[in-house]
Image (tube, rainbow, N blue to C red):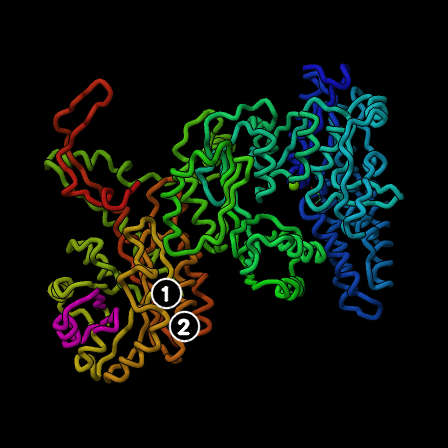
Amino acid sequence: MNNPINNDNNWVVLKFGGTSVAKAEHWQTIAEIVAARINEGFRPLVVHSALSGVSNALSALVAKATEATTGNEAFDVDVDGDVEALKQQHLTLASELGLDGAKLLQPFFDELSVLLADIRSSGSAAPVVEARVLALGELMSTTLGANWLQSHDLFADKTPIHWQDARQLLKSVNQPKKSARSQVLSAVCAHEFEQELSDQLSTLHGVVLTQGFIARSENGDDVLLGRGGSDTSAAYFAAKIGAQKLEIWTDVAGVFSADPRLVRGAKLLKELRYDEMQELSSMGASILHPRAIPPVRKSSIPTFIRSTLQPQVEGTRVADDVAFGAPQVKAISIQRGTVLVSLESFGMWHEVGFLADVFAIFRDLGLSVDLISTSEANVTLTLDANINALNEGALTQLRQGLEKICRVKIINSTAVVSLVGAKIRALLYEIGPALEVFEEYPIYMVSQSASDLNLSFVVDESQAEQLVKKLHANLVSQNQNAIFGPTFEALQQMNVEAHPQQVKPAPQKWWVEKRSELLKMASEEQSVYVYDTSVIDAALARLKSLSNVDRIFYAMKSNNHAEVLSHVYDAGLGFECVSPNEVDAIFKLFPNISTERVLFTPNFAPRVEYEQALARNIQVTVDNVFPLKNWPEVFAGKEILLRVDPGMRKGHHRHVRTGGKLAKFGIPLEDVNEAIALATASGAEVVGIHSHVGSGILDAENWSRIGHVILEAVDSLPNLKYLNLGGGLGVVENPNDQPLDIIALDETLAEIKAARPEMEIWLEPGRYVVAEAGVLLGRVTPIKSTDEIRYVCITTGMNSLLRHELSDSY
Ligand code: ASP
Ligand code: MG
């Protein structure tokens, strides 16, 4: 392709991020990438960031130095220690690269000392001084980078590497509407083609290497392009010199259909249009700075996002020749820390100027509005806490201003979940099922862009991740469209194959290991369940390792085979029973079991069941106020637990989530103190609170969260003896899921335990003990083939494996 601006122009701009440049071993990859582009006939302009963490460290130093006014020795020591650590980080990398770091970097170290001394003595840092300090990060890293590349065999003698000071190359433009501070720390540059710059760089033969993030203002001050601004620098350079392409090299293999830390099955997007990329990067996918897109978009410069950790992966290509294609959701992004402002005014309809008055208040406070939706009497909008300086003071001022013209409600900690892709509107009908998560949680706002590229939901921040997972499973996971590349998981696996020594192999499933034994058993039966007791014992051992849990009751409804129960008994656990028959079975099997180890937790049980259980002296959980109100005499003189509903519904499927407003289980939190009073009036003593929110939960924080909610609500029992946090400990079904982290679960309970050492914490897992221990074997019966489908029939059916029908198991 010929560049429209200059036929001889063959620039490629290569940008490397902080994690790429911070490690010596990645520099070898960088050298190979640069050399490969030269071989392909390109002229590389390399732009790179400071070593990862350095900009943060410099910024913290500026803040500390302002406090470290003379005479405050503790601060001085602190600042000096940080400076030393920063120097060491660079010197270590230099020595790993075989460079004389002390010599190369001394001028920058000296400058840092002088600048910090100035800040210390004046007790404040003007924005230009702060910019000069932060610029040092990129100046130091590029000095090492350029010197190392020059010494590399691939370049030595043949190709000069020209280190250039970006402040001499990039001029920022005046933005009179912006504050002086953001003009300096969040400067912008023009991004038209610049003949002069192009000529200037063209005269340098070889590779040009310069800094991201930094530029100079019209009046000669150092300025920064905003945090994360190296992407923007690279895009400016690409546009200004009319590059053939821009490559952004980072530590993830491209843009994914969701944050891979959240959704392991997120898929690599092979191609995106600029407008889609703009939506994604503005909506919180922090892979490419949103300001980097307009420059390349305007000049139609194809932009590639790739990983220095996996240079063989093609990554994501962003360009304007990408077809719109069929309507589909390409990615789901999440933007946290949003503040929602809801304004109510009854006289708004047909009134001229209401919105103008509202927005004037936001403008005067320097707050930028993100999403907005209006109706006759209400205007709802969001502010992005990441770009707005939203401290309590700013919000109070905002509220005061707005209250003069309307009623105001401000909701902190919401998040925006956005679907991005072409013609989203056509997909509304598919989105419905995913929103089922929101049966009980508010969606504060739905907003759809007129461009039909994005549909956003504003929800409580605590619910956002769940929504992303759900939406991804419904709308992306199934989609086999060619724009989707491998999943994050698969790419990780490739990495594993490339560096096998670094990774432990996943343990073989026992039924694979013991295949021949199983086949032998199967040959003796038509169909049979087989349980491996060593798997049960291992699960029991994991549970017993929970140091902050005092008692564990096995929920025997998950499997009541006598041998399973014996293993549980031998491990010293108790039993959670939901029917008198289950209680009978336990006493029959283990006649000497202590009553402390038997817990009866019925739901809507008749009076006689409570009476029998209490007569047996086992622990009894009462799960609603009806028995206490109507049969108080049954409980007189007895110790009971109350089951409360903490109002959180959790679980892998709608049918197994038991908490929440619509649930039949448990006493609503707001009624629990009243229930305690009723119990006390009946002559019973409430010794414990129980709560169980659902099953199949893999989030380790679930149980401590329940604990905190309960302890906060139940204030009439300062001497609570037992806190039963229920079961629901999940096992992995879908291989994309991460197993429940038992150690993390234990750690999250430590705080509760420390605060209430005298109180016992209980858990009642069921499936966690047995789910992975069993297989169902069946024989193949007739095979039936139609033109399209081959049915392999087996000797078992829904009669022996009903669960997947009930709850869409994987
Ligand atoms: N070093 C700068 C920062 O951390 C710029 C960048 O890395 O993109 O914000
Ligand atoms: Mg970045």
Quadrant location, ligand no. 1: top right
Q: Which residue is mark 1?
A: 646
Residue 572 shown left or right of residue 703 in the figure: left
* Residue 33 vertical position relative to residue 521 in the rendered view, above or below: above
- The front one of 311 and 269 is 269
Query: Mark 2, residues whose alpha carbon is within 10 Å: few (<14), some, or many (≥20)?
Result: some
Label 1 close to label 2 by CB (< 8 Å)? yes
Residue 9 located within the stretch drawn in magenta: no
Residue visible at 25% across and 60% down in the picture: 554
Quadrant occupied by the N terminus:
top right
Q: Which mark is residue 713?
A: 2
Q: Secondary structure at mark 2?
A: helix
Residue 470 shown left or right of residue 372 in the figure: left
Q: Measured from the top left, where is residue 264 in percent x and y?
A: 45, 40
User: Magenta segment, which residues?
Assistant: 599-626
Residue visible at 66% across and 56% down in the picture: 357
Q: Which mark is residue 793?
A: none
Quadrant occupied by the C terminus:
top left
Q: Measured from the top left, where is residue 17 in percent x and y?
A: 67, 38
